[in-house]
Image: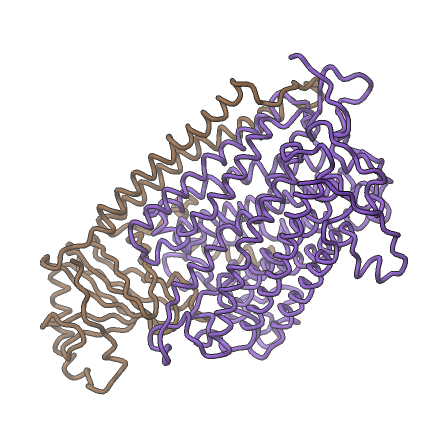
């Protein structure tokens, strides 16, 4: 694709055009970051309410319980509990992780790391954020409707999510909110894809892009293809709810012709499985880069990592049936999905080997972003490997819909992505705000988070194997689960620990933004393009569009002259004969 | 009440209830079926295999972090990992994981699935047939009765009360009235979704008499957590006795007009 250069626009002057309706990808990225962090707080609070109920059923939630549930004296009621786990899932996936990893760092990093002045469609970019904002209002509004918000689980399977199971307007608003968010994300995705294809700086081939950009690019492709599938499903569900169609109704409730509830599950998981990779791909990319930057050596097999991520992207579209083993598909389909799912472990082990290869014989500096990246390798190792139990159909017959599944997907989607997001925040904070975050508080944040996180998700897998199923308000009405009370209490204490650790982050984030030490242009000593410009980045990014002459991971070359151990991407590669 | 005292209250309460070790608590419910051990053993095998690989990852992660920390190893090795040797090692690791873990567990799982769980008992065999209907928030069970035909006057119909014999193959046909439920018997390690408009099936063979629990595993509304039925497992003699007793009662209980009682369907033959 031919290269073209964007013009430098005048700096916006008014408050509105500078901070609110901004076309600048960096400002939009920050808007997404605030949006994501706010929802992370809400979703996290919901998680604590859920955990409290599971550990101490019938006990009032401390402090804020009295205000939230005055009718029950502070105890979470069962209908609210269903709403809580539904919205916890929805919020964390669509309103916290997606905005932080894809919205914030996608927007912020893509133009800076490929040497562009902005996204290729700045207006679309702005629209993408404000549609996400509208979607958030729709979702939050659903909480204040007469029967409360959606309560059918984040997968919202009909017929529970049709008028039979959830008569209130909350579920309809939920569908609309996600539909609007889908439109917003599709806009963002199209923009990312086009930007990466057309606006790479001259000289930058696809394999000269940092792996962060690879991850974001593949994510954007999956987003653009599969979010419309979810949109279609939600629209049909809305029709069933509002206009009396029966796409997903069957049985006694389908009074005017009959559809099939399984249809929705197919549509949902055709989207839903790629969605898992939509969330994790940016984190993989970021981790692949940061491991190299902080080990001070080139990323091991960077091309293989990029290709492995690409093949996972393709495979992820072919395996969704493993979410539906208990719906009695044809055995041939079940077997095929099992086999295809297994093949994902090949590319996964390839980039795991490459990650370990990257830190092998490096010169590792354990700054906060590096700690979080190493944390991702650890928790994703656990999360990925435990997926094997769920991929084999016979063990899934037992483990399906138990807490084992919950523990597994939290390891992959919550733990890994969250740690990846923190790594990115600590790493790019200087370029975003021109100040450094505090290292000591960052390290405390890391270690307490790791401790709490493993306690929570490991504990979930343990109770899952012991038979505790998902989404139950009070597990202990079952006799065979009563022995699990102490383990559940332990999980809840771990969750509170993990939640408390985030206070360190919030303090560090806000304090550093205002009072942190001023950041240099290149505090980490890294050669990618965003570090060739001042911190914080000026509104036009690059006064001169850079010309790229080498890869993103040129660190530790022994033939380098001078006091730098790395090369900028704008420099001719120093030959090394080893 | 502060957190600590609350923790102590629940912990002490549950700890006193039975002096159970953590290991005991982590165990799945007792296996009462002829095939549950297949799933348990595959789980254990998978655990051993993934532990092996996870320990390798940890050795790499912690070992390299320790050996190659900046202070001890200031000069990094300049390599892009693109030499033939490096590529071969990475490819070998990928292949190793696939062959050692994936092929093995997929093979076992596929065998169990096709030869056991999906290998339906013949209709000519002496099997117990049960129709299961999930509704918000209860399980309805239906036995064909003396005539062996469902939806007739001599059917035995129960609510949240499943009674089964040991030593015979039991085939369930499962459906739902309103929303999706999931008919789960943790003690046999099996579950199947109950869906409106569809009839799914599942078969088990039990080995241990006793009283167990039937779980709804799929979220089905506010009182999902209370959708629990009792499964009483009898010896064959006791089961026959119970059936005879129920049979005598049914002729009084079955009112022709009651839709609640006539919810069954014609049994769908397995083969």
Q: Quadrant of the C terminus of chain B?
A: bottom left
Residue A30 visible at all: yes
Q: Is A382 on the left or on the right of B148, as rendered?
A: right
Determine whether B204 is above or below A383 in the image: below
Q: Could you tell me which residue is drawn at 36 percent across and 53 percent down?
A: A325
Q: Quadrant of residue A48?
A: bottom right
Q: Residue at x 75, y 43 (%)?
A: A4
**Tally of numbered discs:** 0
What is the image's colouring? by chain
Relative horizontal placement of residue B46, taking residue B67 as reference (left or right): left
Left or right of A279? Residue A365 is right
Could you say where residue B149 lies in the image, as x and y percent from the top left?
A: 13, 72
In the displayed orientation, state which residue is furthest to the bottom.
B257
Query: Picture coordinates of residue A70 (x, y %)?
Result: 62, 75
Q: Which chain is brown?
A: B
Quarter containing the N terminus of chain B: bottom right
Which residue is painted at 59% across and 77% down in the image? Answer: A71
Quarter occupied by residue A171 = bottom right
Which of the 4 image quarters holds residue B77?
top right
Q: Position of residue B267 (x, y in %)?
A: 18, 68
- Using the image, determine if residue A25 lies above or below residue B196: above
Seen in the picture, residue A355 relative to A22 is either above or below; the reply is above
Q: Colour of chain A?
A: purple
Q: Residue A348 versus residue A77: which sits nearer the camera?
A: A348
Give whichever of B5, B197 is nearer the camera. Answer: B197
Q: Whole-percent x and y of residue B257?
A: 22, 87
- Residue nearest the observer in this picture, A425 or A65: A425
Using the image, determine if residue B180 lies above or below residue A27.
below
């Amino acid at each position: 694709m031919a290269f073209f250069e964007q013009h430098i626009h005048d700096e916006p002057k008014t408050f509105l055009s500078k901070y609110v309706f901004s076309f600048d990808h960096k400002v939009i990225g920050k808007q997404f970051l605030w949006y994501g962090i706010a929802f992370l707080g809400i979703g996290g609070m919901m998680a604590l309410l859920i955990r409290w109920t599971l550990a101490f059923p019938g006990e009032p939630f401390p402090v804020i319980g009295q205000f939230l549930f005055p009718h029950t004296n502070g105890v979470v009621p069962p209908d609210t509990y269903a709403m809580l786990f539904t919205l916890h899932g929805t919020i964390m996936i669509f309103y916290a992780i997606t905005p932080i990893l894809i919205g914030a760092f996608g927007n912020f990093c893509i133009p800076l790391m490929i040497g562009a002045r902005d996204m290729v469609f700045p207006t679309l970019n702005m629209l993408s954020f404000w549609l996400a904002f509208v979607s958030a209002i729709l979702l939050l509004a659903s909480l204040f409707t007469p029967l409360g918000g959606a309560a059918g689980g984040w997968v919202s399977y009909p017929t529970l999510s049709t008028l039979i199971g959830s008569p209130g307007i909350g579920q309809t608003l939920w569908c609309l909110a996600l539909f609007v968010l889908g439109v917003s994300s599709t806009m963002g995705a199209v923009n990312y894809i086009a930007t990466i294809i057309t606006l790479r700086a001259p000289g930058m081939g696809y394999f000269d892009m940092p792996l962060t950009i690879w991850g974001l690019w593949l994510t954007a492709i999956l987003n653009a293809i599969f979010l419309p599938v979810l949109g279609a499903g939600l629209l049909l569900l809305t029709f069933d709810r509002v206009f009396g169609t029966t796409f997903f109704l069957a049985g006694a409730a389908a009074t005017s012709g009959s559809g099939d509830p399984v249809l929705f599950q197919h549509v949902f998981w055709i989207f839903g499985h790629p969605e898992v990779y939509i969330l994790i791909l940016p984190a993989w990319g970021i981790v692949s880069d940061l491991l190299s930057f902080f080990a001070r050596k080139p990323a091991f097999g960077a091309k293989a990592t990029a290709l492995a991520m690409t093949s996972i992207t393709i495979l992820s579209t072919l395996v969704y049936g493993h979410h539906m083993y208990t719906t009695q598909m044809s055995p041939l389909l079940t077997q095929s999905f099992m086999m295809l799912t297994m093949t994902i472990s090949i590319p996964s082990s390839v980039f795991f080997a490459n990650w370990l290869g990257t830190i092998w014989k490096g010169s590792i500096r354990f700054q906060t972003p590096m700690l979080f990246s190493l944390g991702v390798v650890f928790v994703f190792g656990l999360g990925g490997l435990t997926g094997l139990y769920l991929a084999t159909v016979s063990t899934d017959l037992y483990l399906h819909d138990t807490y084992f599944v919950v523990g597994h997907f939290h390891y992959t989607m919550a733990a890994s992505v969250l740690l990846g997001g923190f790594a990115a925040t600590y790493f790019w904070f200087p370029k975003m705000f021109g100040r450094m975050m505090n290292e000591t508080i960052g390290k405390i944040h890391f270690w307490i988070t790791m401790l709490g996180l493993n306690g929570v998700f490991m504990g979930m897998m343990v109770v899952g194997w012991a038979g505790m199923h998902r989404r139950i308000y009070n597990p202990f009405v079952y006799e065979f689960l009563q022995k699990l009370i102490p383990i559940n209490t332990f999980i809840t204490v771990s969750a509170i620990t993990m939640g408390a650790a985030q206070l360190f982050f919030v303090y560090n984030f806000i304090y550093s933004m205002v009072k942190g030490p001023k950041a240099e242009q290149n505090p980490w000593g890294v050669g990618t393009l965003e570090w060739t410009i001042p911190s914080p980045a000026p509104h036009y990014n690059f006064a001169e569009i850079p010309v790229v002459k080498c890869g993103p991971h040129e660190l530790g070359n022994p033939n380098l002259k001078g006091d730098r151990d790395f090369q900028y991407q704008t420099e001719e590669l120093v030959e090394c004969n080893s | 009440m502060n957190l600590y005292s609350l923790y102590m209250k629940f912990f002490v309460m549950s700890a006193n209830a039975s002096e159970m070790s953590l290991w005991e608590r982590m165990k799945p419910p007792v296996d009462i079926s002829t095939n549950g051990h297949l799933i348990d053993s595959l789980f254990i095998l998978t655990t051993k295999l993934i532990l092996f690989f996870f320990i390798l990852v940890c050795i790499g992660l912690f070992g390299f972090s320790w050996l190659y920390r900046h202070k001890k190893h200031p000069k990094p090795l300049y390599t892009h990992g693109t030499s033939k040797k490096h590529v071969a090692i990475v490819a070998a690791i990928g292949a190793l994981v696939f062959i050692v873990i994936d092929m093995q567990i997929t093979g076992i799982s596929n065998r169990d699935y096709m030869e056991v769980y999906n290998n339906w008992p013949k209709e000519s065999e002496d099997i117990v047939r049960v129709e299961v209907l999930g509704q918000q928030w209860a399980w309805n069970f239906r036995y064909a009765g003396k005539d062996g035909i469902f939806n007739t006057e001599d059917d035995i119909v129960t609510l949240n009360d499943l009674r089964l014999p040991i030593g015979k193959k039991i085939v369930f046909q499962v459906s739902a009235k309103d929303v999706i439920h999931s008919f789960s018997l943790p003690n046999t390690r099996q579950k199947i979704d109950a869906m409106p408009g569809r009839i799914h099936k599942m078969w088990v063979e039990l080995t241990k008499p006793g009283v167990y629990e039937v779980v709804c595993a799929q979220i089905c509304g506010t009182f999902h957590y209370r959708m629990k039925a009792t499964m009483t497992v009898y010896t064959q003699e006791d089961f026959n006795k119970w059936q005879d007793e129920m049979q005598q009662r049914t002729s009084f209980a079955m009112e022709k007009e009651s839709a609640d009682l006539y919810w069954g369907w014609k049994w769908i033959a397995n083969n």
